[in-house]
Amino acid sequence: MAKIEDVARHAGVAPSTVSYVLSGKRSITERTRQRVLRSIEELGYQPHAGARALASNRSNVVALVVPLRTGIHVPVIMRFATSVVTAAREHDHDVLLLTQNEGVAGLRRVAGTSLVDAIIVMDVELDDERVPVLRDLRLPAVLIGFPAQAQDLTCIDLDFTAAAVACVDHLAELGHRRVALIGSPPEVYERGTGFATRTTAGFTEATGRHGIAASVHPCESTPAAAREMVTRLLHEHPDLTGVVVHNEPVIAPVLAAIREAGRTVPDDLSVVAICPDDLAEHAMPALTSVSIPAEEVGREAVGLLMAKLGGQPVPDATLIEARLTPRDSTGAAR
Amino acid sequence: MAKIEDVARHAGVAPSTVSYVLSGKRSITERTRQRVLRSIEELGYQPHAGARALASNRSNVVALVVPLRTGIHVPVIMRFATSVVTAAREHDHDVLLLTQNEGVAGLRRVAGTSLVDAIIVMDVELDDERVPVLRDLRLPAVLIGFPAQAQDLTCIDLDFTAAAVACVDHLAELGHRRVALIGSPPEVYERGTGFATRTTAGFTEATGRHGIAASVHPCESTPAAAREMVTRLLHEHPDLTGVVVHNEPVIAPVLAAIREAGRTVPDDLSVVAICPDDLAEHAMPALTSVSIPAEEVGREAVGLLMAKLGGQPVPDATLIEARLTPRDSTGAAR
DNA sequence: GCCCATCGTCGAAGCGATTCGACGACCGAT
DNA sequence: ATCGGTCGTCGAATCGCTTCGACGATGGGC
């Protein structure tokens, strides 16, 4: 393995010069710059990550904490994760994968050993035990999701409140007078996961504002639960004409159950989902939906982190705008 | 941040002694050992990862390359990933997340910069461009999946051939005389992804051996494709009584389509799946299935890697045994 | 024509661990 | 009593890079 000294010798310069060529922290004549770059190329030089981290006090690695909890849709997490990796690479950083398993100790460890420069935490709860730890770690951190006490933290997420509002507004415009929200599993609410409660808040606000009859229903993420939920809703509220679904795994079962109940979407019942676009597009019929901009959130989270690492000020809260795409599952109320 | 020197001073020993206490590479009197450990505790000492990597030539990080390709079931990947992280932590290693995005360059980079000690690659194709690279990287590596040229590589995976055989044997025992395999999307076969072809091989061998009429059908992972597939199969092969499904996302749609076609599972048609247990359990009816032992594979992959890092010899190929669990979706042929 | 900045480069001092050889102390064997 | 061999600990070198201060050369202002 070639070392910086080899490159320096090969190019006829001092090691420090090579370092400055690589980092751009001091100006270098174009001629020597080229010479050094050619030597690097020829020798296939790659700086030793550990040595670099030791000398510069920067590892160029960010930690990503992914949730393993039940009740959250895995493909969405994966999309977050991959977009974080991609974005991090564009900023010349790598991503260390941490799971909830190790809990708070994992955060302390990667921070304490200087293994990472910064941390991204997904699936933040309202009262999250990691929040106080992040506070005294004094490492730049970005949370995907909002805890209750968010002061002085950098948080980002889809604006779920606005997402729910958009769904309700859309249904209200179409003349619906009674709607229901089929939400995340009960355990998600019980954990106080922010996105679920924010969705509910938006839903309640908007239905209230429109004077629409409304009800909220947490729902297990199983086909059976979905089926049962639909049956119950249709039975208890004969005037129900609009449904908002915010629970990916039950979308297909809900549609199937509606069909089996002899109702047609959107003629008898309009359905709006808050879910990834591909899911909405592949449903039958294609669903009017507010998409989950996982890529955008991931990329933006990394952007915020890099800004913090660079010492630039960043906003405490970043809400990604909710965009509703009308498709074939919503129509005028009967 | 406390350094090893601080600990040494606090405990009244040399830094090297502290190091030896931590690594156990030389014997230390119990008394001083305890003294050092207490100092470490009191000062909250955590060794600097970079310095450690530089001096020891070991980063204690393994790279995990996850696929982003279409046609593979995301939750299964996630389960692999988390089990790899968990297992790695048990061996005092961390996991660096690499995506297919950066391709072969990513492997060269993390290896060349000594960022990682070893590599785990998922979703290996028959003719995988990463295989030759791994060969000359000279870093310990474990592949999850089998390439065509697997000599001198360490590979591990579910024994998909045996899995298919188990499914067919099960159906044959129940008296079925014509069966079909609904497989992965065509692109997966075209890429030459090992698990798909191995499943097909096992299916073909076993049906041949039993003298059962058989056909193999790649299938896009969409509900529409599944529906169409079922319709076509029922129409083209009126004598069809058994189906093996090896494509997670279409399992539910296939069952739905069968129901809509007026057939009953398992009375008219027996269905066996190769899929994660939770999926099989939640289907209606619960599916007889061969499970995908993601946790076992991930943990075992890490075990192999650690053995290689420790200089111990490991087998080239490790096949995880296929276990079929009978549930409610299979019965005697009509 | 002289002086002071600025620019480009160099050399050396860290960064914080690991590891190897050396060296007393202590033990049992002779 | 002496010698050789362990055992436990120390000190110093080393890993490969970054960074800071220094220093000659160059150029512009007066």
Image (tube, coloured by chain):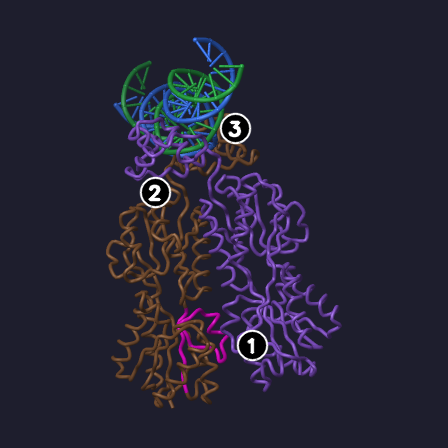
Chain colours: A purple, B brown, C blue, D green
* Secondary structure type for disc 1: loop
Task: Report if residue B277 lies within the magenta region.
Answer: yes
Q: Nearer the viewer, mark 1 or mark 2?
A: 1
> Mark 3 — on which chain does it sit?
B
Q: Which amino acid, mark 3?
A: Asp
Part of the protein shown in magenta: B269-291
Q: Is residue A122 left or right of residue B267?
A: right
Q: Quadrant of residue C7?
A: top left
> Are discs 3 and 1 both within one chain?
no
Instruction: Give how far across and how far down residue B229 sits, in percent.
Output: 39, 81
| Crowding near the residue tagged with mark 1, few <14, some 14–19, many ≥20 C-alpha atoms within 10 Å | many
**Residue shown at 63%/54% (left/top)?**
A146
**Residue shown at 58%/76% (left/top)?**
A226
Residue position for label 2: B112
Instruction: Give how far across and how far down residue A295 sits, in percent.
Output: 51, 57
Along the polypeptide, which appears first: circle 3 or circle 2?
Answer: 3
Residue position for label 3: B6
**Residue shown at 56%/67% (left/top)?**
A275
Residue position for label 1: A328
- In this rendered view, identify the residue nearer to me: A317 or A77: A317
Residue B26 appears in the picture as rendered: no
